[in-house]
């Protein structure tokens, strides 16, 4: 069971982050937009959520490389680390556009 958790943890965190940030974007578009030091509050909140998601993925990847928590040597270790890298890349790739480019219409 722990091997399955090591393999699926990063993609599951990506799934939760993706859903949460896109949902947050929808909620923020419904509210009135203010500004903080000429920086829109909506962008600030989305950027903070994006950076938190990346920090979580980096933490998971770091843990997967620690000898104490790593999978046994071989294919399981490779697959769990590949899942960690996949989660990190997917987080950056799919969430960057909503933070950098999106506007409410």
Image (tube, helix red, strand yellow):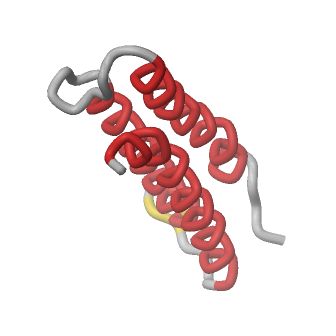
Residue drawn 67% across the image and 36% down it: 93
Residue drawn 43% across the image and 53% down it: 48
Identity of the residue furthest to the right in this view: 105
Asked whether residue 46 appears in the rendered view, the answer is yes
Q: Nearer the viewer, residue 35 or 1?
A: 1
Q: Nearer the viewer, residue 9 or 22?
A: 9
**Disc count in the image?**
0
Q: Is residue 25 left or right of residue 105?
A: left
Identity of the residue furthest to the top in this view: 74
Residue drawn 58% across the image and 42% down it: 91
Measured from the top left, where is residue 43 in percent x and y?
A: 57, 57
Identity of the residue furthest to the left in this view: 68
Tell me where residue 77 sits by quadrant: top left
Q: Is residue 36 left or right of residue 96?
A: left
> Vertical placement of 76 versus 46: above or below?
above
Residue drawn 47% across the image and 33% down it: 84
The quarter of the picture where the C terminus appears is: bottom right
Asked whether residue 38 appears in the rendered view, the answer is no
Measured from the top left, where is residue 70 in percent x and y?
A: 27, 27
Measured from the top left, where is residue 75 in percent x and y?
A: 47, 19
> Vertical placement of 26 versus 51: above or below?
below
> Vertical placement of 9 versus 62: above or below?
below
């Amino acid at each position: 069971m722990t091997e399955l958790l090591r393999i699926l943890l990063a993609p599951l965190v990506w799934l939760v982050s993706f859903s949460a940030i896109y949902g947050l974007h929808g909620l923020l578009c419904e509210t009135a937009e203010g500004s903080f030091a000429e920086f829109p509050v909506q962008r600030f909140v989305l950027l903070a959520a994006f950076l938190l998601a990346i920090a979580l993925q980096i933490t998971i990847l770091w843990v997967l490389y620690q000898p104490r928590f790593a999978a046994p040597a071989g294919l399981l270790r490779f697959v769990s680390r590949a899942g960690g890298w996949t989660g990190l890349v997917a987080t950056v790739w799919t969430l960057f556009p909503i933070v950098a480019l999106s506007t409410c219409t």
